[in-house]
Amino acid sequence: MKRYLYLYLAAILAVAAALTAAALAADPGSREDPLASISYVDRYSQFERVELGTGQSIRIGAGCEFILVEPAGRLIDLVGFNPAASVLLNLSTGNRVDGQAVQSYQLYINGGEQPFKLAAASAVTLLVRGERE
């Protein structure tokens, strides 16, 4: 009888360990573990899908939010963005952006008063909400 109890407990521990490992395997906000799926954002928010071709740019105004959705795993450059004068926040990580590029599948907001441009070195798709041109 004790033998079955030990086997039962061992099986429960093995399942718990496997579930924990699976939960920790994907990075939050990545394609494998998105913070918000594209279908959810399209359905329940006021985000607008914007496609930029190679060399095109979009002006991000104060309070504007955006998510780079395609291509996955790529960075796009920030033009006219000065980290010392502008406030760009990555709401997915809770960090202030101090570099010159943004990452896919992360939610960003221009928390400053100064607009800046996102420039596409190759074709990209963004979800954008707020003041932009």
Image: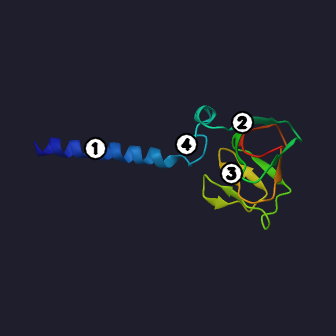
Residue 109 drawn at (x, y percent): 69, 52
Name which residue type carries label 1: Ile
Total labels drawn: 4
- Location of mark 4 (residue): 33
Residue 16 drawn at (x, y percent): 34, 46
Q: CA distance from mark 2 to mark 3?
A: 14 Å
Name which residue type carries label 3: Tyr
Image: 94 above or below 129: below
Name which residue type carries label 2: Glu
- Location of mark 2 (residue): 48
Q: Nearer the viewer, residue 126 or 77?
A: 126
- Location of mark 1 (residue): 12
Q: CA distance from mark 3 to mark 1?
A: 41 Å
Residue occupying the far right of the picture: 55
Q: CA distance from mark 4 to mark 2?
A: 22 Å
- Location of mark 3 (residue): 108
Name which residue type carries label 4: Asp
Q: Nearer the viewer, residue 96 or 32?
A: 96
Residue 124 drawn at (x, y percent): 78, 38
- Which residue lies at the image location 65% right of the left edge and 48% below the top edge? 107
